Image: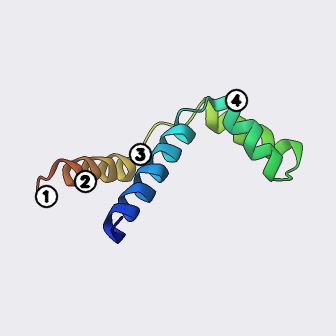
Amino acid sequence: MSGTGRALQKRTHLDAESNRKLERTPAEWIIEARERAVLPATDWQTFRDALFSPPAPNTALKRAARRYREQRSGHAF
């Protein structure tokens, strides 16, 4: 198999892995994060609150999301 073919296989594998990670529920994210990090209870509460009740997007985030969508669709700014 050519180097390009192997690279494509690796990229496809990583994309599938990324998709699997994105399909997790918020609870699964919390469990995984808690297994990897040691935080005081108050920090965990803040993290959980932000995950389940995120703040509304501000102007900068909305602008960044619009630019990202435009770039992904191939349109210029």
Direction from residue 54 to residue 15 in the image, left or right = left
Mark 1 or mark 3, earlier in chain:
3
Direction from residue 42 to residue 48 in the image, left or right = left
Under mark 3, the amino acid is: Asn
Q: Nearer the viewer, residue 48 or 12?
A: 12
User: What's the CA distance linking mark 3 and mark 2?
Assistant: 14 Å
Under mark 4, the amino acid is: Ala
Q: Nearer the viewer, residue 29 or 10?
A: 10
Q: Are marks 1 and 4 in contact (CB under 8 Å)?
A: no
- The residue that label 2 is drawn on is 67
* Label 3 element class: loop
Residue 43 percent across, percent down from the top left? 80, 46
Direction from residue 18 to residue 6 in the image, left or right = left
* Whether residue 12 is situated above or below residue 57 in the rendered picture: below
Q: Nearer the viewer, residue 18 or 55?
A: 18
Mark 3 or mark 2, earlier in chain:
3
Q: Quadrant of residue 45?
A: top right
- The residue that label 1 is drawn on is 77
Mark 4 or mark 3, earlier in chain:
4
Q: Residue at x 64, y 31 (%)?
A: 26
- The residue that label 4 is drawn on is 27
Under mark 1, the amino acid is: Phe
Q: Residue at x 37, y 53 (%)?
A: 60
Q: Quadrant of residue 29?
A: top right
Q: Can you tell which of label 4 and label 3 is closer to the viewer?
A: 4
